Image (cartoon, rainbow, N blue to C red):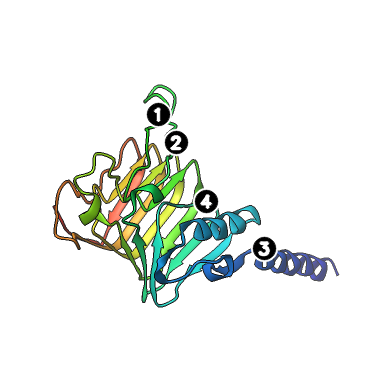
Amino acid sequence: MLVRSSCCCVALSLLLTAQAWKVVKVEEFGAKADNKTLSSDQINEAIRNVSLQGGGTVLASAPGSYLVARVEMMSNVKLVIGPQSVLHGSGVASHWKQRNWVFPKGCEKTSNPSGGPRGGVFWASNQHNFTITGGGTVDGAGSIFNSDSKRSNLLVFVGCSDVLVEDLFLQNSSAWNLNPMFSNDLVFRRLHMSEGGGHGHNTDGFDPWGCRNAQFLDSHYAAG
């Protein structure tokens, strides 16, 4: 009886965990893969909703392109960009809103740059245990913003941990591609990074700042 009771408790625990791990489509929050509807707010709402409920998977997997500005990753979320899907950075400067930088004490001061950083599709600040994957494409609209003084690195994570970014095509960044800062336990693997727009100006592949245990594996880079 004691063993049976213990097994029941374990089974109940697994059931509750499975129920808590949500799977949602960004279309449920109003996103559209039509390359004309700005969908970053809706994608961010899907990510926020799942994170606040304990974690889960957010699917941006419809065939076509989701027009986006900044997409903000949050803890315990797996974002899946489908192989027929593109997150395409908006070419409209006003779509890119200001973001706040908070660096660790003793490293840098808190910085609030004026204006929105353009082309920085992925951002996370002090978030943990998240994944971006799926075989899809991320386009940073670099050919539009490459000469802009407010152009951004494509992916910036600050103060994050336990992060996996894998199986993606990253193209047309307006500046560096991968720029994790003051973060730890990061894996970037099976990524294909290319110029896309052919501008090739300061589009470094992997620039970790003050990170611990940051791995860059099995990837292809051909850019500026």
At horizontal 14% and vertical 60% (from top left) the residue drawn is: 198
Label 1 sits on what residue type? Ser
Q: Inspect the image, locate mark 3, and give the three-letter code of the amino acid beneath it.
A: Ala
Categorize mark 4 by other alpha carbons within 10 Å: few (<14), some (14-19), many (20+).
many
Camera-side residue of 103 and 49: 49
What amino acid is at disc 4? Answer: Met
Which numbered mark, 2 or 3, is in the foreground of this view? 2
Q: How many other residues sit within 10 Å of disc 1, few (<14), some (14-19) or many (≥20)?
A: few
The disc placed on residue 111 is 1
- Mark 3 or 4, which is nearer the eye? 4
Task: Using the numbered discs, state the Cα–Cα distance from disc 1 to disc 4 in whole angstroms.
Answer: 21 Å
Compare residues 109 and 62 and report the one nearer the observer.
Answer: 62
Q: Is mark 3 on a helix, strand or loop?
A: helix
The location of residue 213, given as percent across then percent down, is 36, 44
Separation of residues labelled 2 and 4 (CA atoms): 15 Å
Q: How far from the left and from the top, in percent, is residue 13?
A: 72, 63
Numbered tag placed on residue 100 in the rendering = 2
- Place of residue 9 in the rendered image (x, y in percent of width and height, measured from the top left): 78, 65
Which residue type does callout 2 highlight?
A: Asn
Mark 1: which secondary structure? loop
Task: Give the number of the mark in front: 1 or 4.
Answer: 1
Query: Would you name the residue on which mark 4 appears?
Result: 74
**132 versus 97 height, above or below:** below
Query: Which residue is identified by label 3?
Result: 20
Q: Where is residue 223 in the image (x, y as percent from the top left)?
A: 15, 56
